Image: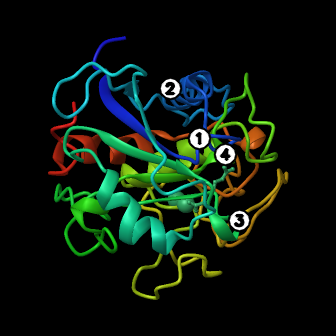
């Protein structure tokens, strides 16, 4: 396809060298394949508003010094052991020590994470394009460059074709699809009201700045049908959207408005624009 924006990724596999955290190259490839299926709108969405993001991801072939990688896209790190790690440990030590140039690579860390956390991401720096929600002041907290990237639990790495046996119902790779969405500037479909500091608040007044994702008041879990958390506004919750909290097997949709936002970020965010 023409006009595809290709982002090189490096998976930092934080592991003690044995067990499920020592993800195989095949598992990483399956995860990458799922990410690309989802970002190409090939997951089977039934929504007319579903769209191809025109973004794809490839395994980095060379390290920061230009040396060919034995395992493309994979940096195995055994210096910290196998965890489980708190997000505090990951934020204050592991990320800065192991990160590759965030303007050259999308950094993805996989690890055993404590507290049942599936993953988390850092938003882009402001894209400043006049697109509501992506300008300075309304992108939410912008993290430091040396923590830029995405963290996902090792047991969330997988795909529809090759689900991770450790993590159902979050074992088909949609955690990375979701976190990469945040990394590209997408909010949860129920909105994240930074002013209130409560990303999960039960408010239909918060917006994800996408008119084609029906207003939603809170995260949804499982795979519910006919849920309408904001009955006073049009449309039932789009629980199939990657930016909800539903099961991996339920998710299959990014919308055209979400695509506009990620393309604005990839074009205008200083930290993202040079990746291509
Ligand atoms: N709770 C996480 C977040 O807000 C990830 C949710 C992922 N959901 C999934 N079905 N894999 O970033
Ligand atoms: Zn999220
Ligand atoms: Ca919306």
Q: Residue at x 39, y 86 (%)?
A: 195
Q: Position of residue 244 (x, y in %)?
A: 63, 56
Q: Which residue is mark 3?
A: 116
In primary-sequence order, the first of circles 4 and 3 is 3
Closest to the camera, between mark 1 and mark 3, is 1
Residue pointed to by mark 4: 156
**Label 2 sits on residue:** 36
Task: Measure the C-alpha gap from mark 2 to mark 3.
Answer: 26 Å
The residue under the point 26% across, 57% down is: 131
Q: Earlier in the sequence, mark 2 or mark 1?
A: 1
Residue positioned most to the bottom? 196
Q: Position of residue 149 (x, y in %)?
A: 37, 52
Q: CA distance from mark 2 to mark 1?
A: 27 Å
Label 3: how many Cα within 10 Å (few below 14, some 14–19, many 20+):
few
Which structural element holds mark 1? loop
Q: Quadrant of residue 252?
A: top right
Q: Which badge, 1 or 3, comes first in the chain's sequence? A: 1
Color scheme of the displayed model: rainbow
The secondary structure type at the circle numbered 3 is: helix
Please count the marks in the image. Answer: 4
Q: Which mark is residue 17?
A: 1
User: At numbered mark 4, what does the secondary structure look like: helix, strand or loop?
Assistant: helix
């Amino acid at each position: 396809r023409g006009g595809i924006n290709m982002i090189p990724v490096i998976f930092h596999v934080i592991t003690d060298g044995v067990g499920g955290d020592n993800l195989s190259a095949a598992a990483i490839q399956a995860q990458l394949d799922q990410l690309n299926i989802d970002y190409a709108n090939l997951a089977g969405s039934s929504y007319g508003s579903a769209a191809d993001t025109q973004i794809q991801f490839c395994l980095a072939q060379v390290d920061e010094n230009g040396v060919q990688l034995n395992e493309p896209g994979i940096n195995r790190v055994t210096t910290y052991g196998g965890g489980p790690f708190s997000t505090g440990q990951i934020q204050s030590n592991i990320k800065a020590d192991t990160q590759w140039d965030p303007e050259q690579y999308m950094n993805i860390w996989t690890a055993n994470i404590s507290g049942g956390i599936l993953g988390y991401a850092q938003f882009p720096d402001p894209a400043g394009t006049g697109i509501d929600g992506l300008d300075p002041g309304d992108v939410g907290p912008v993290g430091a460059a040396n923590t830029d990237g995405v963290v996902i639990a090792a047991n969330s790495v997988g795909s529809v074709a090759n689900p991770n046996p450790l993590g159902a119902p979050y074992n088909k790779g949609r955690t990375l699809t979701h976190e990469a969405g945040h990394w590209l500037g997408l909010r949860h479909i129920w909105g994240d009201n930074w002013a209130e500091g409560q990303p999960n608040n039960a408010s239909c007044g918060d917006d994800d700045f996408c008119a084609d994702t029906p207003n939603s008041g809170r995260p949804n879990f499982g795979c519910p049908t006919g849920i309408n958390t904001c009955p006073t506004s049009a449309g039932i919750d789009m629980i199939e959207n990657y930016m909800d909290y539903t099961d991996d097997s339920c998710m299959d949709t990014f919308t055209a408005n979400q695509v506009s936002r990620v393309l604005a970020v990839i074009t205008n965010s200083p930290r993202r624009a040079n990746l291509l």
